[in-house]
Image (cartoon, rainbow, N blue to C red):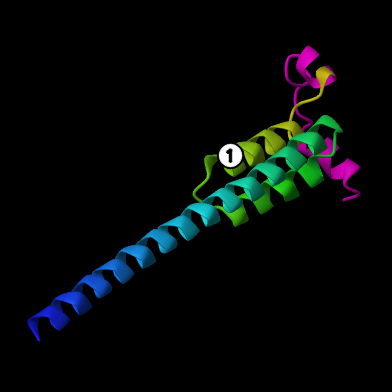
Amino acid sequence: MKVISAAVGIMLLGASLILAYLSNSNATQMLAKKDAIVMKYVSDSTAALENGDTKAAIKFAKLAIKADPSSKKGFTSLEDAYKAKYKPSEDYMSNGGGSEQPAADEEEEEEDMGC
């Protein structure tokens, strides 16, 4: 009886080790797949930025974040897309960041607004 119990114990231990290996292998494969998806979206976001399409770049960066919220790559891509979208124009920057004219007084503002 002890021999049978020992054999069953060894079989259960072996089965546990096999299951642990397979589950770890699957987890590694899933992480690699998730990373590949993130890299694809980041690549698409970068390509959209190079073509001047900030709306598409933002969309792809958000998809990268959705695919793996723990990945910094998606957030960095989103940051780059927003920086490109809200980058001041060359004219704006060459004028010191804005016009040197003082703000209109209240009467001028009311006239402009039709009040």
Asked if residue 91 lies left or right of residue 24, the reply is: right
Near mark 1 (Cα within 10 A), the count class, few <14, some 14-19 or many ≥20, is: some
Image x and y of residue 30, in percent = 54, 56
Q: Residue at x 89, y 42 (%)?
A: 111
Residue, disc 1: 73
Q: Nearer the viewer, residue 18 or 49?
A: 18
Horizontal side, residue 114 vs residue 71: left or right: right
For the point 53% across and 54% down, which residue is it?
A: 29
Vertical position of residue 28 compared to residue 22: above or below? above
Q: Is residue 95 visible?
A: no
The magenta span reads 91-115
- In depth, the one of 80 and 74 nearer the eye is 74
The residue at the point 72 percent across, 38 percent down is 43
Percent x, y of residue 26: 49, 60
The residue furthest bottom is 1
Instruction: Identify the image quadrant of residue 98.
Output: top right
User: For the residue marked with disc 1, what is the amino acid?
Assistant: Lys
Task: Classify mark 1: helix, strand or loop.
Answer: helix
- Percent across and percent down for residue 57 are 76, 42
Q: Quadrant of residue 107?
A: top right
| Outermost residue to the left | 2
